[in-house]
Each structure stands twice: as structure tokens, then as C-alpha cells.
Image (cartoon, rainbow, N blue to C red):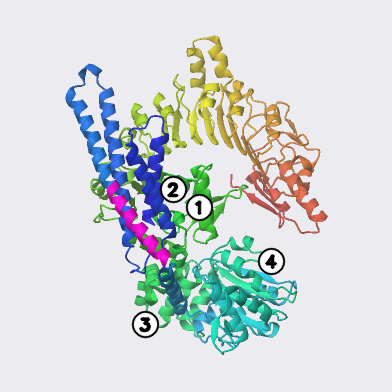
């Protein structure tokens, strides 16, 4: 919903201006109060607002009017910010004596113009709020009956179009549609699983939620269960009711009682005069309870959208330990945890074989598949991504169409648009329900997923940064915006609108996510309707000047250059492909998000972005760019008063020296240098400025850590440091006193003062290692990576003893470094939380481990290029949680000891072993291949 997101965004701007220590502008007190009141009222209004039934291709006029007014307010405020920053920069560049009266008058006139322009917008917002208030009162006076009826009627039409049983009696006949019958292809195992839960198992009443994305087959599975012969024999009473998002408690109870009893007047009572009247809701619930008492019942509640309806009717369903069951179908995966007495069943996408079976059954039934169409058919099926609704829809279309190669090729090339628009947009309506039922605060986040190309694996950390920068995350007291983004993402996953693609190694957090192609197409349709963003591809298109976001996909340099010159009101510029297509930003002073680099999609190469130009974007919150070798940080960086994220990439070795003004970026959360570029961060200025929001600092070179730096970055969570000897020694030589030298030598000891640090990576070169012995780690660390190049002063025995006592450490990676004695003897009680241990090129000979309890939760052990290690301790095999061991180019004896561990554990566990060992050996050790077994993989390298 564009209007709601715009309101949240405007409130962000107001809050930032109020809380910033040196805001670029101030807003008149009365205007500020009026803006805040309007935004707050309209947010509350939209939360309760049910739009009237309009053409699916048109946005609601009231929401459009709200969005336009808010956009106008943002334009006025942020344009004034640009003007004031420009004026201040001009004045600072001159001596006070040279500032003439004309320049002062220009400033006064600009302030007056700002006041009048903002007042005009406020009056429009006042008018909208008045109209919304009148509408709200009118709806409240009629109990929202008409609006609810419209929505419920729409839902019922969709149910009817889907031919799903809203009223199903015990004598309901099985569907004769071959498509519907074939829809159970691939779900027979799930069918049998639920059948077992229905007819066997515990005697107490049990609730069985069937969960999954819209169109994945939940209702079809429930119908097959409802009509199954074994189920018919097992239960005494059957009832089916559709809940939907606009449920009515009384109607639900009546529906169940009517189907159970067959009495059409079940909700009526008759007085002595023979007059009938409706009984109360409580009386109806009690009547249903009494009717079900003593009978084994099966109730199917289709399409449940919240726990609220169950909480209101649960007391009407008795539990007499007679094996009664209630099946709930839902798109909400988290509903299982809210339903007591429940056993959830998740519906997954069909695999390749099942998808093909469903497709062939739908198109040709029992007939043979034409050979000349088989390859095209498989491409069509692959593009459906395992969604039964998509497969069945396209299959049904092909079953009724001409069976020619040319026609099928046309279908293949336009698959998603055909699926969405076929059958009176039936599929779109089914999927769109998931969107319309979203809370307002989630809708902009979901629509934003259409920015990414089809089948894209989306890095969650990047997605959250973009959500934050766009300004449509609604603040919650006591929570940072990243935490709110995490919660929003989880909600969308629980609603099966976003798919989990990859989890973090041990955290369980979502690292990469995806969106199904059909849901992405739904996003694009809603985006088009709400003018949320515009996508520019290979050829120029007419840009709607009311668009706030522009996405470039595979657009050439000429197209981007031509289009960018006409984008004066745009707020977001996103290049989802190669960043080097962008030249210099034009007319982008109102841009908040400028993403022209993406670590997951861009091919590395020399960029063509110039930081000096980028920093003209004074309102920007997110900047991600590639650099050429001549780029530098300008001192004007402090003009970026609202910058959250700065990501700078360069593939050629390059160092960027930041000006001291960088410490004045109070809102900065993520400062990341990637590729082969490095950041030289200066010492903080003498005046106290605190970067309280900074969470990520990546590839900072020779960062001088001291008490002052630590105080100014108290909330850093992720830190990547690089220390090189030439510069480090140079700093020592140039120091003004011996005390200063000692402070620099002790800089590693200040790490422990970063009490929120969770992820630390240190790259240490020879010359700096003698200072590293004094390192102290914060107890908050969860991930630690240490790389030592030609470091002869670092003794790993001492370092590992410090690391071993870190209580939360889950992942430890060491590169190089030496064991002075050649021996590592682990100490009992250490590494209590470690789940991954990786040693690379370490000079280890003898690893001694007295008991397996030293690594009680270790899951993965990786040993790479340990040429001298004698063996892996046998106690490693006794670690109950260990799942894998990887050895690459280790000694022969180490590989043999790993094979022995596998053999011993197989004997102890009767051949059922969860541990898998993989060894890569050089060609000269190919005899070790004879050690291979089902749990021990040996690969011989050609080198």
C-alpha cells in the first residue's frame, strides 16, 4: 500500500529532523504539530479502512489522494533541505565579509516560500483527514456492514470460482474433474500421513493445520481426505466450513451445525405461538456442543487467517477422548504454534517428477505424450516452479487448445502472464488474497520484492538495508530498524509469501530468500496499479513522473543516461544488474536509495562511479557504488545528514582516505568497503561526536583503536580490520611521543571494550603481529576469523587459550599462524558454544584432546593444508553433535586417523552413523582412496 508506506516515510523524516543534533532545517512548531497529527490519524484510519470494491486494475482513489499529498509534503521538506545545505556550503566557502545582503535576502525569501509551500500541503492533508474522519464515522454508524459484505462477497466469489466446497454434507459426491483428481499427484505421502493422524494415534481431540502458499493444494488435500472411504467409515459426523479473513462467528457455528444435523432451521427457536426467532450466538454454540457430544466428528475449517476465530468457537467442540479431529487449512505457517492440541502438516512445492506427472495427467489424461512436445512441456513445467495451481492452470489451458509445437512455444514464452490472466484472472485472485490480507505495514515490504529479477536468490542483509533506507518500516519503541526488518521478514515467510532459500550456518537466521515467480508477478501488477516503482529495461520508456522509485534491468548506458535526466522527483535508483552501466547521477538531489552495486549479481570490473558526484545526494540514506581507481572521499561527506548505508566496491587494489568529517554521520549504520578496496579512517575530531548507530565497519585499514574510538562506536556488531606493516610502522615513526607509540602498540587490547561486537575478522601482516599478542576479545563474539600473513610473533597456543573461554563463540576460522611447541592441547570447559572450527595452513603437529566434552556442540570440523598434523584425536569422533569433517591436503596420517574415527563410530553405533568425512588428497597420496566408505569420501586432486 503506497499511501501507508508514504505516511511512515514522512514520519521518519520528521523524527530525524527533530532528533538530529544539527538538522539542516527546522519546521514551524504549528506546522510540525499539524503534520504529525495528520500522519498519525491517517495511519490509524488506513489500519481500519476497508477499500470499496473497485476494478482490480485501479488503485483506491482515497488512498491515491493520501499518497499524493504525503509525497508533496516530502518534496517540499526535502527540497528545502537541499536548498539550505547548498546555501550553507556556499556561505562557508566564503569569508563572512564577502557575504552580501542579496544572499541573506535570498535565504529569508526561501524560508518564507518553504513555509507557504508546506502550509499548502498541510491544508490538503487537513482536507483529506476531514473526509476520512467523516467516512470513518459513517462506516462506524452502520457497523461497517456494507464494507464487510463487499469483501466477503468477493471472497465467496473466489471460492465459487475455485469450485471449492463451502457447504459440504456427509453425502457430498467426489468431483468428476480429472484436473482436480490429478492435483493430488505428489501429495500421496502427505495424504497418508494425515490419514494416519485422522484414524489412529491419540484418542483426545486433535487439530491438524495444513499449511502452505496459496495455490499449493491445501484445500484439494483437505477435500480428498474429507471424501476418503476410510474417513467416511471412521467418523460419525462431517462438516466443512470456509472461514476466510472476514469470518463471522455465528455463521461459522451455524454452518457446522447445519451440516452435522441437516436441520436448515438449526439457529432458530420457536415460541408457544409457533413464531421463530434467531437464537443468540452463545446459545448456538451450546447447541452445537450438545449435538457433537458423544459423536466422533471431523470438521474441516478451510482458509483460516488468524487464531482469533478459533479462540471464539473452540468451546463449542467437545473433547471426549473419542478420536474427533479438526482440520484447518491456512496460509500462515505460524498458526500451528498458536493452536493447542495441534499437529501441523506443511505443503511443499512439487518435485520435478511429480510436477511432470501432474502436467501430463492434466493435459493428456491417460493418453501418451507427443514426443515432439516433450522438451517444450518440460520447460513449461520447470517454469511453474512446483506450484500445483500454476501447473494445473496451464495444463488445463493446453488440454483445451490446439496441440501444435508453435502454440506450445508461444505458451512457454509467455507462461506467467498467461497463468495470471487465464480463466478470468482466477489464479491472480487466489494469490491476491494473500496480499490483501496483509497488515498495512507489511504490504510495502512485500511489493518491494518485485524489484529483484525472477528466481533471484536475495541476500537478506542487503534486503533489510534497502527496506530501512526506503523509510517504510514503522518504528517501534525500544527496537532498532534492523530488528523490525527481521520481524517483518519472518512474518512474510510465515505467511508463505517469501521463501527461505538458505539459512545461516548455525544461527538459524535466514541468509537468502526468494519469491515465487507468480507472486513476483502479483507484486508487479500491484506496483503498476499503485505507482510504487517503475522498471526500465533494454529500451527507454515513458517515465511516470509520479513514480518514486526506478529500477534498471539490463538497461544500457545510453538508456540509463537518457532516462536519468528526466527523474527529478525520484526517490530510489536501483540498478539490479551491472553497476558500471551508470555514469554520473543527474538531478538526484532527492534520491534516498542509490544502489548501483550488488555483490551477488555484478560482474567484477572497474566501475565508473565518482564519489564526489554521489555525495551531491544530500538526502540519500543508502549508497552502493563501484569506484574507479581515481575516486576519493570529499570533505562534503558530512552533508549526508541522513545516510544509513555506504557500500563502496573496487576490484583494483585501491585505498580511500576518509575525511575527518565522516565522524559526523550520526545516522550511519553500515560502512562497508568490498572487493579489493580499503578504507583509511582518520582519528576522531577533538569535539565529541558519537556514531551511536554504526553497526558494520568493513575493511578498515590500520584502524587506530583506542578509548576514544571505542566510545564513539559503542554499538558496532560487525568489524573487519586489516593491518599492514608498512603503514603501521610509519605511524609509529611519525608519532609525536613514546607514549603515543605505546598507545598504538596496545590498540588491539581495546577490542574487548566493544561489548556488542558479534562478528570480528582481522587480517594481520608481518610487522603488526608483535602487537597482536596483547589482543583481548569481547565476550559478545559469535564469529571470529583471524588471518596471519608471515607472522612470526603470534603464538597460537596463547591466542587460542583466550579464544576458548569466549562463552558465545560459534564459529572460529584461523589462517596461518604457528604453534610454538607444535602442540595444541585443548582445555576442558573451553569452546562451549563452538559449532564450526576451521584451521588453514597452521603449523600444528600434535593435537591433544583429553575428552570430547571440550567441544560439546561442535557440528563441523574443517582442516585445510595442515601438512604436519599427525592425527585427529579419536575423542573428536565421540562428539555427539559432530556431523562433518573436511580434510584438504592434510598429512596421510591425519586422513588415516579420520578413517579410523569413522570405522570406530560405525562399530559403536551399529552402522547407523550421522558423521560424514570428506578428504581431498594430492595425487601422490592416491592410495588413500582405498579408505573410502559410505561415510568416508576420498577425492584425489590432479595436483
Q: Point out the tag, 2 or 4, that comes first from the N-terminus.
A: 4
Position of 43 compared to 353: left or right?
left
Distance CA(mark 3)–CA(mark 2)? 46 Å
Q: Are marks 4 and 3 in contact (CB under 8 Å)?
A: no
Snapshot quadrant of residue 55:
bottom left
> Could you say which is closer to the camera, residue 349 or residue 567?
567
Distance CA(mark 4)–CA(mark 3)? 51 Å
Tell me the residue that label 1 is attached to: 488
Position of 598 compared to 865: left or right?
left
Q: Which residues are magenta?
A: 122-141
Q: Point out the tag, 3 or 1, that comes first from the N-terminus.
A: 3
Residue 128 forms part of the magenta stretch: yes
> Could you say which is closer to the camera, residue 472 or residue 34?
34
Q: Point out the tag, 4 or 1, that comes first from the N-terminus.
A: 4
Tell me the residue that label 4 is attached to: 341
Q: Are marks 3 and 2 in contact (CB under 8 Å)?
A: no
| Structural crowding at the residue carrying mark 1, measured as other residues with C-alpha within 10 Å and reported as few (<14), some (14–19) or many (≥20) | some
Distance CA(mark 2)–CA(mark 4)? 37 Å
What x and y, as percent, mark residue 68? 30, 53
Position of 365 compared to 596: left or right?
right
Q: Which mark is residue 467?
A: 2
Helix, strand or loop for the magenta stretch, by majority: helix
Distance CA(mark 3)–CA(mark 1)? 45 Å
Q: Is residue 516 visible?
A: yes
Callout 3: SS: loop
Q: Are marks 1 and 2 in contact (CB under 8 Å)?
A: yes
Snapshot quadrant of residue 137:
bottom left
Amino acid at each position: 500500500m503506497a499511501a501507508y508506506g508514504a505516511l511512515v516515510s514522512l514520519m521518519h523524516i520528521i523524527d530525524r529532523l527533530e532528533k538530529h543534533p544539527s538538522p539542516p532545517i527546522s519546521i514551524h512548531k504549528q506546522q510540525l504539530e499539524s503534520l504529525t497529527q495528520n500522519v498519525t490519524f491517517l495511519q490509524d484510519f488506513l489500519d481500519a479502512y476497508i477499500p470499496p470494491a473497485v476494478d482490480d486494475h485501479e488503485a483506491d482513489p482515497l488512498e491515491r489522494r493520501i499518497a499524493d499529498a504525503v509525497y508533496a509534503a516530502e518534496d517540499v521538506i526535502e527540497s528545502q533541505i537541499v536548498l539550505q545545505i547548498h546555501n550553507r556550503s556556499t556561505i562557508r566557502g566564503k569569508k563572512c565579509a564577502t557575504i552580501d545582503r542579496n544572499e541573506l535576502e535570498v535565504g529569508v525569501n526561501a524560508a518564507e516560500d518553504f513555509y507557504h509551500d508546506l502550509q499548502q500541503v498541510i491544508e490538503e492533508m487537513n482536507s483529506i483527514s476531514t473526509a476520512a474522519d467523516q467516512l470513518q464515522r459513517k462506516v462506524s454508524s452502520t457497523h461497517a456492514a456494507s464494507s464487510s459484505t463487499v469483501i466477503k462477497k468477493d471472497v465467496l466469489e473466489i471460492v465459487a470460482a475455485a469450485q471449492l466446497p463451502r457447504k459440504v454434507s456427509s453425502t457430498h459426491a467426489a468431483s468428476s474433474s480429472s484436473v482436480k483428481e490429478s492435483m493430488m499427484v505428489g501429495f500421496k505421502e502427505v495424504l497418508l500421513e494425515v490419514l494416519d493422524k485422522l484414524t489412529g494415534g491419540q484418542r483426545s481431540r486433535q487439530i491438524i493445520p495444513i499449511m502452505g502458499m496459496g495455490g499449493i493444494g491445501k484445500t484439494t488435500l483437505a477435500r480428498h481426505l474429507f471424501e476418503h472411504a476410510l474417513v467416511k467409515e471412521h467418523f460419525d459426523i462431517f462438516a466443512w466450513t470456509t472461514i476466510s479473513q472476514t469470518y463471522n462467528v455465528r455463521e461459522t457455528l451455524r454452518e457446522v451445525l447445519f451440516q452435522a444435523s441437516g436441520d436448515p432451521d438449526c439457529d432458530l427457536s420457536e415460541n408457544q405461538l409457533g413464531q421463530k426467532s434467531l437464537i443468540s450466538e452463545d446459545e448456538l454454540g451450546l447447541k452445537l456442543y450438545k449435538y457433537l457430544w458423544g459423536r466422533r466428528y471431523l470438521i474441516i475449517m478451510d482458509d483460516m487467517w488468524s487464531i482469533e476465530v478459533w479462540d471464539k468457537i473452540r468451546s463449542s467442540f467437545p473433547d471426549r477422548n473419542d478420536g474427533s479431529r479438526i482440520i484447518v487449512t491456512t496460509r500462515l505457517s505460524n498458526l500451528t504454534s498458536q493452536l493447542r492440541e495441534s499437529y501441523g502438516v506443511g505443503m511443499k512445492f512439487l518435485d520435478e517428477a511429480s510436477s511432470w506427472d501432474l502436467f501430463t495427467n492434466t493435459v493428456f489424461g491417460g493418453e501418451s505424450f507427443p514426443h515432439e512436445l516433450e522438451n517444450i512441456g518440460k520447460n513449461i513445467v520447470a517454469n511453474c516452479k512446483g506450484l500445483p495451481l500454476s501447473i494445473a492452470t496451464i495444463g488445463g489451458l493446453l488440454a483445451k487448445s490446439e496441440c501444435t509445437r508453435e502454440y506450445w512455444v508461444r505458451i512457454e514464452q509467455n507462461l506467467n502472464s498467461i497463468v495470471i490472466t487465464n480463466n478470468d484472472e482466477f489464479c491472480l485472485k487466489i494469490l491476491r488474497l494473500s496480499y490483501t490480507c496483509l497488515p498495512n505495514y507489511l504490504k510495502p515490504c512485500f511489493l518491494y520484492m518485485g524489484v529483484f529479477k525472477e528466481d533471484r536468490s536475495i541476500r537478506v542483509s542487503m534486503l533489510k538495508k534497502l527496506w530501512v533506507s526506503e523509510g517504510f518500516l514503522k518504528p517501534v519503541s525500544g527496537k532498532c530498524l534492523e530488528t523490525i526488518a527481521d520481524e517483518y521478514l519472518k512474518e512474510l515467510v510465515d505467511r508463505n509469501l517469501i521463501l527461505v532459500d538458505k539459512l545461516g550456518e548455525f544461527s538459524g537466521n535466514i541468509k537468502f530468500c526468494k519469491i515465487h515467480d507468480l507472486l513476483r508477478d502479483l507484486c508487479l501488477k500491484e506496483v503498476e496499479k499503485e505507482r510504487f516503482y517503475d522498471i526500465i529495461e533494454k529500451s527507454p520508456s515513458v517515465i511516470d513522473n509520479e513514480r518514486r522509485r526506478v529500477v534498471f534491468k539490463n538497461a544500457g548506458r545510453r538508456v540509463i543516461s537518457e532516462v536519468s535526466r528526466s527523474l527529478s522527483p525520484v526517490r530510489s535508483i536501483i540498478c539490479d544488474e551491472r553497476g558500471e552501466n551508470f555514469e554520473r547521477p543527474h538531478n538526484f538531489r532527492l534520491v534516498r536509495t542509490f544502489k548501483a552495486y550488488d555483490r551477488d549479481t555484478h560482474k567484477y570490473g572497474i566501475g565508473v562511479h565518482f564519489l564526489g558526484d554521489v555525495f551531491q545526494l544530500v538526502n540519500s540514506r543508502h549508497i552502493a557504488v563501484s569506484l574507479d581507481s581515481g575516486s576519493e572521499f570529499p570533505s562534503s561527506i558530512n552533508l549526508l545528514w541522513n545516510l544509513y548505508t555506504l557500500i563502496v566496491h573496487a576490484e583494483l587494489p585501491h585505498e580511500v582516505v576518509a575525511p575527518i568529517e565522516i565522524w559526523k554521520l550520526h545516522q550511519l549504520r553500515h560502512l562497508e568497503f568490498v572487493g579489493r578496496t580499503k578504507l583509511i579512517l582518520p582519528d576522531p575530531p577533538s569535539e565529541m561526536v558519537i556514531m551511536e548507530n554504526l553497526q558494520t565497519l568493513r575493511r578498515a585499514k590500520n584502524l587506530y583503536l583506542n578509548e576514544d574510538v571505542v566510545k564513539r562506536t559503542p554499538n558496532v556488531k560487525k568489524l573487519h580490520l586489516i593491518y599492514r606493516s608498512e603503514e603501521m610502522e610509519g605511524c609509529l615513526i611519525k608519532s609525536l611521543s613514546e607514549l603515543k607509540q605505546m598507545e598504538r602498540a596496545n590498540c588491539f587490547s581495546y577490542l574487548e571494550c566493544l561489548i556488542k561486537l558479534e562478528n570480528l575478522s582481522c587480517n594481520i601482516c608481518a610487522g603488526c603481529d608483535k602487537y597482536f599478542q596483547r589482543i583481548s576479545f569481547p565476550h559478545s563474539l559469535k564469529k571470529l576469523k583471524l588471518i596471519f600473513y608471515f607472522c612470526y610473533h603470534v603464538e597460537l597456543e596463547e591466542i587460542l587459550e583466550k579464544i576458548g573461554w569466549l562463552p558465545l563463540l560459534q564459529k572460529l576460522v584461523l589462517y596461518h599462524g604457528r604453534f610454538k611447541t607444535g602442540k595444541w592441547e585443548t582445555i576442558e570447559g573451553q569452546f562451549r558454544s563452538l559449532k564450526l572450527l576451521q584451521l588453514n595452513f597452521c603449523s600444528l603437529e600434535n593435537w591433544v584432546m583429553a575428552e570430547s566434552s571440550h567441544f560439546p556442540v561442535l557440528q563441523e570440523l574443517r582442516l585445510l593444508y595442515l601438512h604436519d598434523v599427525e592425527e585427529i584425536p579419536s575423542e573428536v569422533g565421540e562428539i555427539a553433535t559432530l556431523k562433518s569433517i573436511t580434510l584438504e591436503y592434510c598429512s596421510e596420517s591425519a586422513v588415516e586417523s579420520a578413517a579410523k574415527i569413522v570405522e570406530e563410530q560405525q562399530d559403536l553405533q551399529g552402522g547407523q552413523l550421522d558423521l560424514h568425512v570428506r578428504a581431498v588428497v594430492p595425487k601422490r597420496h592416491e592410495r588413500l582412496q582405498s579408505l573410502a566408505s559410505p561415510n568416508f569420501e576420498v577425492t584425489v586432486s590432479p595436483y
